[in-house]
Amino acid sequence: MLLVDRKALLAIPALWRLGFRPFFLGGALFALVGIAAWAAVLLGLLPAWEPLGGWLAWHRHEMLFGFASAIIAGFLLTAVQTWTGRPGVSGRPLMILAAIWLAARLGWLGGAPLWLVTPLELAFLPALAFFVGRSLWQVKQVRNYPVIAVLALLTLADAQVMLGLWGGHDDWQRGGVLAALWLVAALMGLIGGRVIPFFTQRGLGRTAQVPAWPWLDNLLLAGTMLVAVLTAAGFGLAPHPLLGALFAVLAVGHLIRLWRWRDKGIWGVPLLWSLHLAYLWMLLAPAGMAVWNFGAPIALSLPIHALTVGGVGGLILAMIARVSLGHTGRPLQPPKVMAWAFALLNLGVLCRVVLVLWLPMQGLSLAAACWVVAFLLFAWHYGPMFWQPRVDGQPG
């Protein structure tokens, strides 16, 4: 049972009552601004100034440590309250955590000196791990300790990127960013493996949820974390058959999961088909990485963007669309326009990994446009939910 000081929580402005509010809003706004800026760079529409490390370094770092990390923070700070029955972070501590995240984003984009950006950048994830880990430790909830391990490794990956910037080592930066991507994928797989079958059962009114297979969950988590560690060590920057075999195992594992979750009823529920389609990209990405590591003449960027845009971006958009409704006291019926947002995001993935093979700039431009419109629709329709109190009068 969750024990909160209702009066004290209701005295806090709504935006700062629970972690999903500032971080889902900030993450969604950053997603659309970040990709719009990157598209403008590719089209030669931005002025000559550059962010810290240059536009490419900014894009590959910030879409993970800016966008994805914000959503992860919002989800974990909210979920840990449900997991443990203890009050989530709110008020001034939440404001400080959000300020650290925002200051690092502004520092990167504004080209601030490394000595200033580095401590801001490396403070956020450890602070998040502290708040989440403290609640887990207080109730000895061992089941969720892997979340802290992933956050710790993400911090090390971010430190590797920063060291690469300090020393001018592009391979260190690339290795750190790609390692972080697979760590985010590991976390998405862990959380998705729990909530997708649960949401499917609840959303379709099924009598029973597809039972978990712990051995498969652990295999996918450990395997993806291993990929991240190997990539950080430099083994993921060139094709290698052993890595190809590891990626093939991960792809098969995700396929087994998705097959077990199948239910034709999802196609009538946007909050469900969006999750299942996003998880399909989570499957196709390691499959593509396996093909690349086995020596097929495909660009590494194709499976990487299948994961970043379709898997990570798709799961994020689908998850925050549902979680935001439930935690603001609303029925789990998103605005009808969100079905278009989900469809646009998936169309954007096709443009980024298929259309670019024939029409590179058109594919990139259309992919960016689809992404920006999808997150703009979310921000426009969900934004007020974050700074307004719950509609049912409950705290949180």
Image (cartoon, rainbow, N blue to C red):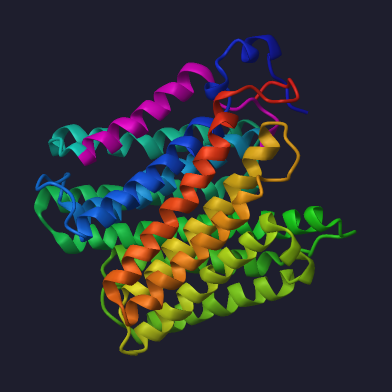
**Residue drawn where x is 42% and y is 82% of the image:** 290
Query: Please, which residue is most extreme toward the right here?
Result: 207
**Residue drawn where x is 39% and y is 51% of the image:** 153
Tell me if residue 82 can be seen.
no
218, 296: nearer the viewer: 296
145, 239: nearer the viewer: 239
373, 216: nearer the viewer: 373
338 left or right, relative to 3: left
User: Where 88 falls versus 182 (above or below)?
Assistant: above
Tell me if residue 71 can be seen.
yes
Return the x and y of residue 190 as percentages of the image width and height: 58, 57
| Magenta-colored stretch includes residue 88 | yes
**Residue drawn where x is 49% and y is 31% of the image:** 22
State the quadrant of the N terminus: top right
Residue extent of the magenta highlight: 83-109
User: Where 303 falls versus 79 (above or below)?
Assistant: below
User: Where 340 falls versus 90 (above or below)?
Assistant: below
81, 28: nearer the viewer: 28
Return the x and y of residue 232 as percentages of the image width and height: 30, 62
**Residue drawn where x is 53% and y is 44% of the image:** 378
Main SS, magenta residues: helix
State the quadrant of the C terminus: top right
Return the x and y of residue 300 as percentages of the image width and height: 32, 76
| Magenta-colored stretch includes residue 26 | no
How many discs appear? 0
53 left or right, relative to 239: left
Return the x and y of residue 37 as percentages of the image width and height: 27, 49
